[in-house]
Amino acid sequence: MGTTLADIAASVGVSVATASRAMSGKPGVSAATRRAVQAASRELDYQPSAVAASLRTRSTGVIGLLVPDITNPFFPAIMQGLEREFAKHDKAVVLMDTEEQVEVEAARVEALLRRRVDALVISPVHPTRSADALRRAGRHVPVIQVDRRTIEDADFVGVDHAWAITKLVEHLHQAGARSAGFAGFVEGNLPIVERERALRVACESFGIECMPTVAAERADLSWGRAAIREMLAAGTLPDVVICGNDLLAAGALAELDSTGISCPDDVLLTGYDDAAPIAELLGLTTVRQPLSDLGREAARLLRQQGEAPRTVLLTPAVIVRSTSNRQLDQPPDGTALLVATR
């Protein structure tokens, strides 16, 4: 059995109540007694009970983080920013994967609430069907939505996708693209839905023909390959294939290569996220999201609680590499051009 507060009190010759006040920094204890209690706690290697502290303060010091797919490099990057920020304030983060399923998400939310987390940071699975679980959670703890949103009465931290897609299409237009197709439209994945919608608006603005969108069940490698196969089966590829994220783009690039279609000579290709080395290694043009900043902003909103729901939109950057620039030979060091930021 470990050292207890009673052991500390006995070693110093004070009451347990006095030792408790000395350890917690409360008034009513002399400086000499406080120093003696703290010295005894170090000597006896006393570890305060987190459970007891949570009962006193009604705070566990734990934040629940729920993400739709932990295997997607996008989400660990957000978690890193969140965890580092909370660690500065002696808060711990508990991560749960909701497996892109609303039912699993609801169960995970309830599990975290039973463990009395202080708040929830969540990237909801679905823009409408996730709403009930988040509203229930919001009655008990603060809720911050990151990247995806399902309810309007909770804070949200996201990225200005429309601006990024417009700048990306501007670059592609300058690169000579006259037709474009969106690969990897995942129904219910709000950021990808927003990117596809923004592509249509931007293409109209720049006079680029927008080809039929290719849907996917998941935003991963296999569905990126399937999207290229579907485009080829339908006829001629567009001048540029814009993928919903980098995983889809990596699959698309592999499929193009396997069919003997050269990128960028025969077709231009882009992704979205720049969340992992995969984009740099492949020389993939993409949109770099400020992933760590998303986590840090979510942590800031939780620390600075406000009454009205707040929305924070961060600015990404368009990163041009060899898959959309025929004049840029991609060297091993992953050289890229930053063509748009603000």
Image (cartoon, rainbow, N blue to C red):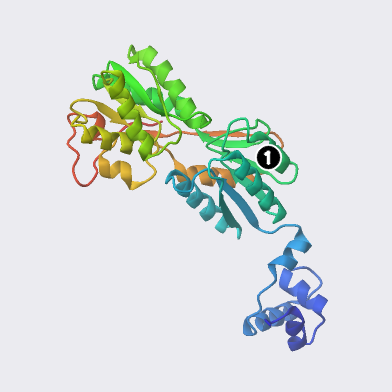
Q: Residue at x 48, y 43 (%)?
A: 293
Q: Position of residue 289 (x, y in %)?
A: 42, 38
Q: Is residue 181 above or below residue 271?
A: above
Q: Residue at x 56, y 58 (%)?
A: 87
Res 182 → quadrant:
top left
> Looking at this view, is 88 or 184 the one in front?
184
Res 319 → quadrant:
top left
Q: Residue at x 40, y 25 (%)?
A: 165
Q: Is residue 179 above or below residue 224?
A: above
Q: Is residue 286 visible?
A: no
Q: Is residue 93 visible?
A: yes
Q: Amino acid at mark 1?
A: Ala
Res 251 → quadrant:
top left
Q: Is residue 85 left or right of residue 203?
A: right
Q: Position of residue 22 (x, y in %)?
A: 75, 74
| Quarter of the rendering occupied by the N terminus | bottom right
Q: Position of residue 10 (x, y in %)?
A: 77, 87
Q: Position of residue 258 (x, y in %)?
A: 22, 36
Q: Is residue 226 left or right of residue 110?
A: left
> Which residue position holds label 1?
133
- Label 1 residue SS: helix
| Quarter of the rendering occupied by the C terminus | top left
Labels in figure, total: 1
**Label 1 CA crowd tier, 10 Å (few <14, some 14–19, many 20+):** some
Q: Residue at x 29, y 29 (%)?
A: 269
Task: Residue lying at the far front in this picture: please name it.
Answer: 233
> Looking at this view, is 5 or 233 the one in front?
233
